[in-house]
């Protein structure tokens, strides 16, 4: 079954726009076309990004976007950042893409360009 970005907490990847490839968590569903997104870094809880559902790729991952955070208070941007990083690292390793490989490939490309 394909994951849909129409539930709060769903982890999604932007496929269109200047933020293509960026990982977000869905904060809320505005209607059947739009959702609000947060990554805790460039898009914080105080000012989430509004984006069309058709420009997102939903992953079979979820994180908590409401309730209590690690500090015992309400969810903070740091909780969102931490949860997204953990989910992203686990997902990339599970799918066979190790972050170390990307770093080494980047260095190799830099050497080739010199």
Image (cartoon, rainbow, N blue to C red):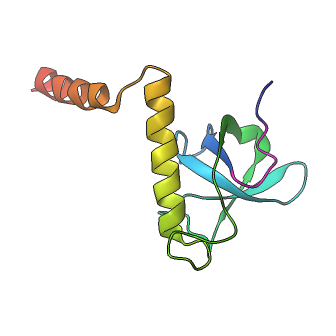
Query: Residue at position x 25%, y 24% from top?
Result: 105
The answer to whether 114 is drawn above or below residue 9 in the figure is above
Query: Residue at position x 52%, y 50% from top?
Result: 84
In this picture, which residue range is highlighted in magenta?
Answer: 4-9
- Is residue 49 left or right of 84 when viewed as pictured? right
- Is residue 114 left or right of 61 when viewed as pictured? left
Name of the residue lying farthest toward the bottom: 73
Residue 82 seen in the current view: yes
Query: Is residue 90 shown in magenta?
Result: no
Q: Position of residue 67 (x, y in %)?
A: 69, 70
Residue 40 seen in the current view: no
Query: Residue at position x 43%, y 38% from top?
Result: 89
The answer to whether 27 is drawn above or below residue 22 in the figure is below
- Is residue 92 left or right of 65 when viewed as pictured? left
Query: Is residue 6 shown in magenta?
Result: yes
Query: Residue at position x 61%, y 42% from top?
Result: 14
Please tell me whether the stretch drawn in magenta is mainly helix, strand or loop: loop
């Amino acid at each position: 079954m394909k994951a849909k970005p129409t539930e709060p907490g769903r982890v999604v990847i932007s496929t269109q726009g200047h933020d293509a490839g960026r990982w977000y968590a869905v904060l809320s569903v505005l209607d059947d076309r739009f959702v609000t997104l947060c990554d805790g870094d460039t898009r914080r809880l105080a000012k989430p990004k509004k984006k069309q559902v058709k420009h997102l790729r939903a992953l079979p991952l979820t994180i908590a976007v409401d309730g209590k955070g690690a500090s015992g208070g309400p969810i903070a941007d740091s909780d969102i950042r931490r949860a997204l990083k953990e989910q992203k690292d686990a997902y990339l390793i599970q799918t066979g893409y190790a972050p170390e490989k990307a770093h080494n490939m980047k260095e190799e490309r830099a050497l080739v360009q010199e």
